[in-house]
Amino acid sequence: MGALTDIATIARWEVKRTLTQMSKDTLPLAIVLFILLILVTGFAAQSGMHLQDGMYKVGVDDPAIAQLLASDNRFLVYQLDRATLEQNRQAFDIVVMEGKVYGSDTERAKSALKTVERDYAKYTNRVYNRQDDLYAAYPLWIDIQSVKSELDFLATQSGQYISARPGAVAPVPEGEVRAIPSPSPALGFSKEDLRGELAKSETANSQISRYTEMLSSDTATGRFRTPSQLSPPLPFDSIILIFVFIFPLYFTSQFFMMSIMNERIERKGEVLLSTPVKTTSIIIGKVLPYLIGMIAISAALTVYLRASLLIILPLIPVIFFFLANALIIGMVSRSFKELSFISIFFSTVATSYLFFPSIFANVHVISLISPLTLIILTLQGTAYTFTDYLFSTSLFWLTSAVLFYVAVVNFKEERLFSEKRLLIRIREFIAESLSRNHPFVSLFLLNGFAIPFVFMVQLMCLVLFFNLPMPYSLVLLLIFAAEIEELVKAIGIYTLSEQDTAFLSWKNLFFACAATAIGFLVGEKLLLFITLTQITESVFGSILFLSLGMLWMPLALHFAGVFIVACALKFWGRAGLVPGLLAATAVHCLYNLYFILGWLT
Amino acid sequence: MNARHLSIIMHKEFRGLFNERTILLAVLLQLFVAMFSSFLMVGLTSMYDPSSLSKYSRFRYSIAYAGNDSGLREYLDASPDFNVYDMDLSPAVAALKERKLAAVIYAPDTAPDAVDPVKITLYTLQNDLQSAIVNVKLKDIFLKYEKDLRGVRAVRLGERPLPLQLPPSRGGGDFYEFVYGLLIPMLVFMPAIIASALVIDLITEEYQHETLETLISTPVSFAEIIWGKVLACELLVPVQAGAWLLLLLINGIPISNVPLILLMVTLSSAIPILIGALTALHYRERTAAQFIFSTALVVVILFVLALPANPLNLLTRLAVGTAGMEQWIVLAGVIAIGAILSIATQQYAEKIGRQHHTG
């Protein structure tokens, strides 16, 4: 009961302090800025974004076409007579003479040509849409029927081809053939519905759609498209909405970061630490207001957008992840500059991890590694399963839990008020989480719990390399996956040997390596068992998680890797770390290569 | 203002930055963003312009054609991308589910010149990268067929669009606008934003770590301290922006007018940096200052972007090489605003400096 009261008290302090700090003269200015923001947004919406104005130079001889092109700010349109145009061809990216478009051969001209093409297509659509006989202007409609594959669809999504090489005869289905009624030739929508939809897709957010003109967005007429609307759907609106959700979270976690940092400045937090309140209570108390605030903001946004409250579910692990990282960042950085740089770095990396996979929400299963994809799916009204939820959020849950644990054990005087370098501090943080009396158990646990981080980084690499041409992506992934694993395995032993150089006796070294290898393997197994089956079954997964076939083989590999590093540390001390890591990575890569080559042939 | 004092302060700040190795993080950040944007470009290109990846264009996809004969069939047969089989609808869809086909097309019994539109039903696999590519390839064929049908029904059209004859598409130029119209101005201007956040840290740190009194007791004046910090941040901008441009150039993205771009960025970065310095001087506490500053920055950037011929637009136009005389007017405007802010900063700093000496 006492802990609860402590937590409540500390949470109250935290709120009170933030509010008094804010209300002095920040709040009035913040309100003014907020009003300005609304005004400016209105102004920007009216005037449009002028980032790309005047990128291309166009020479035109016909005033009507000049007017048509000039409606696009990207063009600098010069209306000249034909002779002048012909003389100065080189001065323009594009020249339009007597209804014919000529482009130069530069990249800029090619891009300008594409823009003219799209603008012209929009213009013709506008004209056609005014026709009384809509079906003369749009005689062809495509009805897209999505079919769910009954086979294991992971294989093809990981870079393999969709079907066997075409043969001379038509393929014969092996399974049961369910009768499909012939589709009716009628559209099932009124002309006016279709016309409205065409008009909408033509005017839709033209500023933003510049980047996405080749992609279409979802329409109210659903699967019905004219051929020009036929592109993989990009959930663009939803992606914008995601930023609406994520930005308040950044802001709030910044406040939290600063609150932690403020405790450390001039040892202000010493008072708090000298009270009999447990560190867990202090941290929970300090986190609580921000956690509640973030959830409240998200909920308010959801209600405002009239979206399903289910959106909050995938957001919660993200919120925890932000708070856990904010806590650690606030605890390790020594100065404001460092705080700024680390937090900018963290937020860029986190945004990339969250944001980029979600672009492929409708296209590829890889997108599910980001919880934001679940938000997009919810916004689109697509259901996701509990497994999907586990798959995309479990890493966030686990890493946050581990980070909170590290923060709790390190939340004490000698850590908070030390002025050592960043890497040393991080090492001390890890060292604090290791028990001195039970180094092997600690190593086992450390490596087990490091697995979620390893997977996160490896998945990040997967996303990064996924789109490189096939052999390169595999090779890079191979090397990086091995490098990351070896690095993480080395951390524990390195920390122990740094603390106590005598630790690495041969006996200890052997047991430490064994504990590391077993911990790593168990963590890997467990996490894969829970979630990652989706990716592990693909080609890429087989590289990342190759070490799953038989148990003793990967164990031997993990042991060998960490043993190489440990020996290097024993013989050369700190200087041996990098060469040791390189050697271990090479061994790891060779092992993987051997298996993949064996498996491919 | 004593130049030696300024350089002492600048040295102090640079030493701090290098000692903490925070600058390393900034470099890492640059590399990371560059890597990710290239990922985005390659990824999107390969997805929406499949021929850019040769492994996809080599491949002939098997598709089934069901239903009635139509002009579409001829285009499909002629296409090098597809292998067309005549099949009944039900077995075709079953084969699609087993991934023996890439798509199934069903054509209805609608005459090309009928009153009603022709409704083609396209069966594809859900959530699949390859079927996205098949869709893109089919789109071209559908467009040709649509043009034919439109030709047949042309007599029923009222108003005709202005004729414009476009040259055949030669590919390329897909991401030109993305790179030059978004990536370059964003990446080049990012150092300015980082520098202005940094100046807030540098100033509030002196207050919150209570090191200011020591500094003031030296012959360096308060205004000189502030200007030293501002200049240190200002100096970082061209270095970082230059690194960006170099990175892009190494990546094979040609950029025109590099010196002018650097000049433009350096001068316009003075505006956010001075706004940052003023906010920090006013609040003397990081949380409030950073909060107000970042909100203000969003307002200012949004406003600036909504203005025609804004400095960011000028960066784009300089990079592509279409900037005209108006760039000098914009530059003059930027310098004028910077000068006003400089005077404000100087006066504010002097005022605070006097308070420190008397109080």
Image (tube, coloured by chain):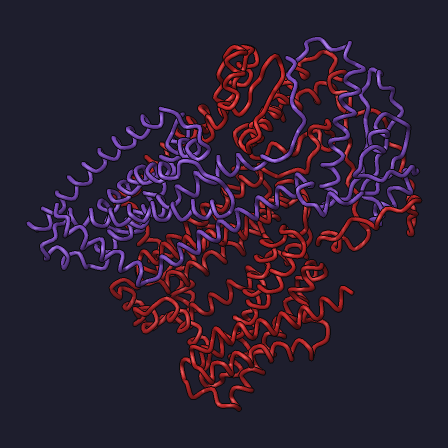
Asked if A587 appears above or below B116 in the picture, the reply is below
A82 or A315, nearer to the observer: A82
Identify the residue at horizontal 69%, vertical 35% (top origin): A231
State the hue of chain A: red
**Hey, which quadrant is residue B104 in on the image?**
top right
Relative side of A131 to A76, left or right: right
Picture coordinates of residue A468, whole percent (x, y): 62, 51
Q: Is residue B335 visible?
A: yes
Q: In the image shown, does A166 or A290 lie closer to the viewer?
A: A166
Work out which residue is located at the far front of the displayed protein and give it: A87
Give the image location of residue A7, x and y in percent. Answer: 40, 63
Q: How many marks?
A: 0
Q: Residue at left 19%, top 59%?
A: B210
One can see residue A299 in this view: no
Residue B251 in the image: above or below residue A527? above
Q: On the rendered image, what quadrant is the N terminus of chain A found in?
A: bottom left
Colour chain B is painted in: purple
Task: Give the residue at the far left of this rendering.
Answer: B358
Residue A428, horizontal then vertical, whole percent: 39, 74
Q: Nearer the viewer, residue A122 or B179?
A: B179
Name the quarter where the C terminus of chain A is drawn. Answer: bottom right
| Residue drawn at x 53%, y 31% as measured from the top left | A108
Q: What x and y, as percent, mark residue B195?
A: 32, 47
- The residue that appears at 70% across and 58% down in the rendered structure is A534
Tell whether B41 sits left or right of B66: left
